[in-house]
């Protein structure tokens, strides 16, 4: 053993501080850590993985070293900070998140993983003396948007740091562990499959709670549930409706899903509270609380209601009085006093944390939650209820996966409190109990890397270790590790494709001649026709552009296509130096619109000319009316313009004529089964192209991450962020911008797009680089006028330029600015009331606060990157001060 406290091992001293004996897997992991090894612990939710992380903290404090405890989300960081302060005292524990910086020089600091990544790139002096890093919920490296951060940290941590990786149970733990050994050295792998509290599976159907399994081995499905499913199918019930899809059969008693209040009452009668009821909809969670309250449900005693009120008033004392109504405070408090609550991302942090604490204290008995609650927050229950096994993933309704089911139900069963946990699925029409049994008994949750080298990562790597070493570091990523291993699977797929090609070739064989040659002629004809069509399109566009460039103010034209087709008078030709013309016109119905090239698929010619006064004001209704009257007075007929194509068609092309002659002369052209052969030839050709793509993928798998890095560096050199092996001043700024649109932010800074904006306008523009519209989005979003509109227009143009540059370098990293939060950010930075902003934006308070904090984070980066005494640094600081107020300013750490 490396560490001892007196005559006792550190583990013995540490374990004595708990009021329960440590489990074998906890002891195994702690012993490996004490012996000097890194550790990977994979165990079910609630099994007690964090005890191993807390032992790393104990070792660091006992040996005079530092320990950084990282978590994927701020809420979990805040919660862990409170736990460690309670154990070790506030003097030795700090917190660093985007919202809070408390005692950052302490020997133990809890932080989000992004904070540690930024410290590593910056070479922060806080890294001196670092002995241990705990990566809680390390399986987050599968996260599509943020997962790369975990790999960056694992790769870049100094070799002397011992890594403690805590993961949910995943199906490829051994593969992940094998990679950890390659990049971190000796790593002990501890896998725990058993839950500390047994979990029993149930289905709530026909107002009864059925066991899902009829045996103790989780093999045989309860015959009663199979019977119910069979009867529903016979009566025509489908999965998407509680109504029968066809008439007939006996009544529908017990087949509709129970009311939510009835579900909670059933759990209460069975002593199965407290419970988390997962509903995959924020609105559904809120509706569930209202339904239960309207049903008169009260789960708390009078004494408990008093304790709830006292705690809530204490936690919410700093919230502005005038905001309580818009936040729904009073209804929220009434529900809490009843022992009911909702938990989702639409709540402000104060409300969410209050619900979590009251639930842990046993003062909230039923929480209706979205699946985000399952992501790391310590909020165990006796029971977990899943209302439906289908959820909306942002694009479609999809089935809950086995991994998701395991994650959700893992909350059931409180260690040290419950002797067993219970998972309950509410019966809905179309539910298949056999499929549910498969979910409940499967533990498939593979860890897949989402790593790729971003622009920010590239300049940081080149600046810190140089291009060659950076390439080697990237090739050591888990993404590359998995990619190399997957080539075997691609090879098998290619072999199957090659075998299928032989069968297709046999099916297209023709007794009259070589059908492959005949099919090649048909293919060349089709390709030539497509080429001519594309060329004709280019010619038509060029002709249309030329005709628009000749327009003058007052010209009367017929707009050929689009929503505003018809007669119009040109106000401004809209001819720029670089872009296609975008004429501004007045239509017959008095609308002033600036038209894009899509409205002109054919050239236009002036039909007449009207005098447009120099003082013409498009905002004046009378001016528009007068000019429209003059337009109609010309007596020109409306209707669409006919255009002469002015190009040679396929029928006139000599190449096509020659190819068609060869095709007709080919022996296979006379075959009576020609089209049947052609269908097989089409399949053969499509599969051949697929096989070629597979070969390309196989070639690309080796060193694929480093090749992407090379393309990123090539683009950054082109734009002036890198100069060979050196980072330019612009690159140094990019290195300090951590945002999905990092390159777009850096270019806005370089070009001074935001320099002349007010703090309010800057907040609105910056919001477009962090906000993401939920769902399909609203095309009629409100945008502030003046400086904001102009700056957003420049940003959109700049985004287009950068996307063209990405296309040239075969990259696809940037996303377009999203204007959906611009008005809300503008109004809030302009000191508008919370009620007004939420009403105008139709955002929930929680979403509003969350997006404001995202804007604040990027504003802080801009402030730090901009020249210290320059206008943008001053403006960004003022914007931060303007936005950090009210519910946005309230700290979530108490």
Image: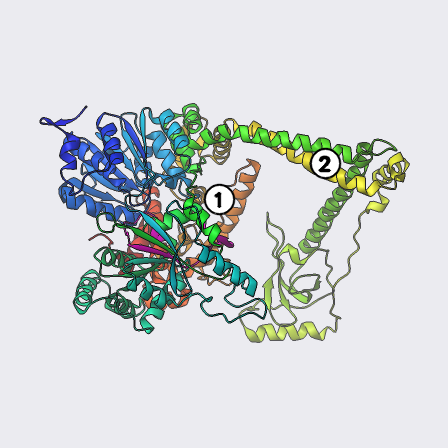
Whether residue 19 appears in this view of the structure is: yes
Please say whether residue 387 is one of the residues in the magenta stretch: yes
Contact, CB < 8 Å: mark 1 with mark 2? no
- The residue that mark 2 highlights is 684
Quarter where residue 367 is shown: bottom left
The kind of secondary structure element at disc 2 is: helix
- The residue that mark 1 highlights is 814
Quarter where residue 235 is shown: bottom right
- Please give the label number shown on residue 208: none
Q: How is the image coloured?
A: rainbow
Horizontal and vertical percent position of residue 572: 61, 61
Which of these two is toward me, 15 or 685? 15
Whether residue 64 appears in this view of the structure is: no
Q: Earlier in the sequence, mark 1 or mark 2?
A: 2
Residue at figure coordinates x 77%, y 32% from the top left: 506
Which of these two is toward me, 461 or 492? 492
Q: Is residue 603 left or right of residue 149?
A: right
Compute the Cα span from label 1 to label 2. 37 Å
The kind of secondary structure element at disc 1 is: loop
Q: Is residue 824 left or right of residue 712?
A: left
- Mark 2 Cα-neighbour bin, 10 Å: few <14, some 14–19, many ≥20: many
Quadrant of image for the N terminus: top left
Magenta region: which residues? 372-400
Which of these two is toward me, 494 or 554? 494
């Amino acid at each position: 053993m490396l560490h001892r406290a007196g005559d006792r091992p550190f583990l013995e001293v540490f374990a004595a501080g708990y009021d329960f004996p440590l489990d074998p897997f906890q002891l195994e992991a702690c012993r490996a850590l004490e012996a000097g090894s890194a550790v990977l612990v994979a165990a079910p939710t609630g099994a007690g993985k964090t005890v191993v992380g807390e032992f790393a903290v104990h070792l660091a404090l006992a040996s005079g070293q530092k320990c950084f405890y990282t978590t994927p989300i701020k809420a979990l960081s805040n919660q862990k900070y409170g736990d460690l302060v309670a154990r070790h005292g506030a003097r030795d524990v700090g917190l660093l998140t985007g919202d809070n910086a408390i005692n950052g020089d302490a020997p133990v600091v809890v932080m989000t993983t992004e904070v540690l990544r930024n410290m590593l790139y910056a070479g922060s002096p806080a890294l001196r003396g670092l002995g241990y890093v705990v990566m809680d919920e390390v399986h987050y490296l599968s996260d599509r948007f943020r997962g790369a951060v975990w790999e960056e940290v694992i790769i870049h941590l100094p070799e002397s740091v011992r890594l403690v990786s805590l993961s949910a149970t995943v199906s490829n733990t051994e593969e992940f562990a094998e990679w950890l050994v390659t990049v971190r050295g000796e790593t002990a792998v501890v896998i725990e499959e058993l839950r500390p509290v047994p979990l029993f599976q149930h289905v709530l159907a026909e107002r009864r709670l059925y066991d899902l399994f009829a045996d103790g081995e989780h093999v045989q499905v309860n015959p009663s549930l199979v019977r119910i499913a069979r009867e529903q199918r016979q009566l025509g019930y489908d999965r998407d409706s509680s109504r029968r899809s066809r008439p007939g059969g006996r009544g529908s008693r017990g087949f509709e899903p129970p009311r939510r209040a009835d579900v909670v009452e059933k759990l209460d009668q069975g002593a199965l509270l407290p419970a988390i009821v997962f509903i995959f909809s924020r609105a559904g969670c809120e509706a569930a609380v209202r339904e239960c309250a309207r049903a008169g449900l009260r789960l708390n005693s009078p004494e408990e209601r008093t304790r709830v009120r006292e705690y809530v008033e204490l936690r919410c004392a700093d919230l502005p009085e005038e905001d309580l109504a818009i936040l729904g405070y009073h209804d929220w408090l009434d529900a809490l006093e009843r022992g009911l609550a909702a938990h989702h991302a639409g709540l402000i942090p104060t409300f969410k944390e209050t619900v979590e604490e009251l639930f842990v204290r046993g003062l909230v008995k039923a929480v209706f939650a979205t699946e985000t609650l399952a992501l790391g927050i310590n909020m165990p229950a006796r029971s977990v209820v899943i209302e439906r096994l289908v959820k909306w993933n942002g694009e479609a309704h999809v089935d809950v996966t086995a991994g998701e089911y395991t994650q959700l139900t893992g909350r059931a069963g409180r260690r040290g409190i419950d002797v067993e946990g219970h998972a309950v699925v509410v019966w809905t029409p179309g539910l298949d109990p056999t499929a549910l049994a498969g979910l409940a008994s499967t533990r498939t949750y593979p860890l897949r890397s989402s790593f790729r080298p971003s622009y920010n990562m590239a300049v940081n790597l080149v600046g810190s270790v140089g291009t060659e070493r950076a390439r080697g570091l990237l090739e050591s990523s888990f993404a590359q590790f998995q990619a190399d291993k997957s080539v075997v699977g691609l090879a098998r797929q290619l072999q199957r494709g090659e075998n299928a090609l032989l069968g297709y070739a046999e099916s297209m064989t023709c007794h009259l001649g070589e059908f492959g040659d005949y099919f090649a002629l048909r293919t060349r004809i089709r390709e030539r026709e497509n080429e001519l069509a594309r060329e004709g399109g280019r010619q038509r566009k060029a002709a249309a552009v030329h005709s628009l460039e000749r327009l003058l103010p007052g010209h009367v034209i017929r707009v050929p296509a689009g929503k505003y087709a018809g007669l119009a008078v040109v106000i401004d030709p809209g001819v720029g130096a670089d872009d296609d013309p975008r004429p501004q016109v007045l239509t017959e119905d008095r609308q002033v619109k600036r038209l894009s090239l899509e409205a002109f698929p054919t050239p236009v010619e002036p039909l007449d000319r009207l005098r447009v006064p120099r003082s013409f004001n498009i905002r004046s209704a009378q001016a528009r009316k007068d000019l429209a009257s003059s337009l109609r007075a010309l007596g020109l007929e409306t209707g669409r313009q006919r255009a002469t194509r002015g190009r040679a068609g396929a029928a006139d092309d000599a190449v096509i004529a020659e190819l068609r002659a060869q095709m007709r002369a080919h022996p296979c052209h006379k075959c009576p089964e020609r089209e049947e052969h052609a269908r097989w030839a089409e399949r053969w050709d499509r599969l051949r192209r697929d096989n070629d793509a597979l070969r390309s993928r196989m070639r690309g798998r080796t060193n694929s991450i480093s090749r992407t890095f090379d393309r990123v560096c090539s683009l950054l050199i082109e734009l002036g962020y890198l100069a060979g092996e050196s980072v330019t001043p612009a690159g140094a700024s990019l290195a300090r911008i951590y945002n999905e649109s990092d390159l777009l932010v850096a270019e806005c800074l370089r070009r001074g797009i935001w320099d002349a904006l007010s703090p309010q306008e800057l907040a609105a523009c910056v919001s477009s680089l962090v906000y993401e519209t939920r769902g399909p989005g609203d095309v009629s979003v409100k945008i502030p006028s003046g400086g904001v509109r102009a700056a957003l227009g420049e940003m959109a143009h700049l985004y287009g330029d950068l996307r063209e540059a990405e296309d040239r370098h075969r990259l696809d990293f940037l996303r377009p600015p999203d204007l959906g939060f611009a008005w809300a950010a503008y109004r809030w930075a302009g000191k508008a009331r919370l009620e007004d902003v939420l009403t105008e934006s139709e955002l929930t308070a929680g979403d509003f606060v969350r997006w404001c904090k995202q804007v604040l984070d990027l504003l802080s980066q801009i402030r730090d990157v901009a020249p210290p005494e320059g206008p943008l640094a001053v403006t960004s600081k003022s914007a931060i001060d303007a936005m950090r107020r009210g519910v946005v300013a309230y700290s979530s750490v108490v």
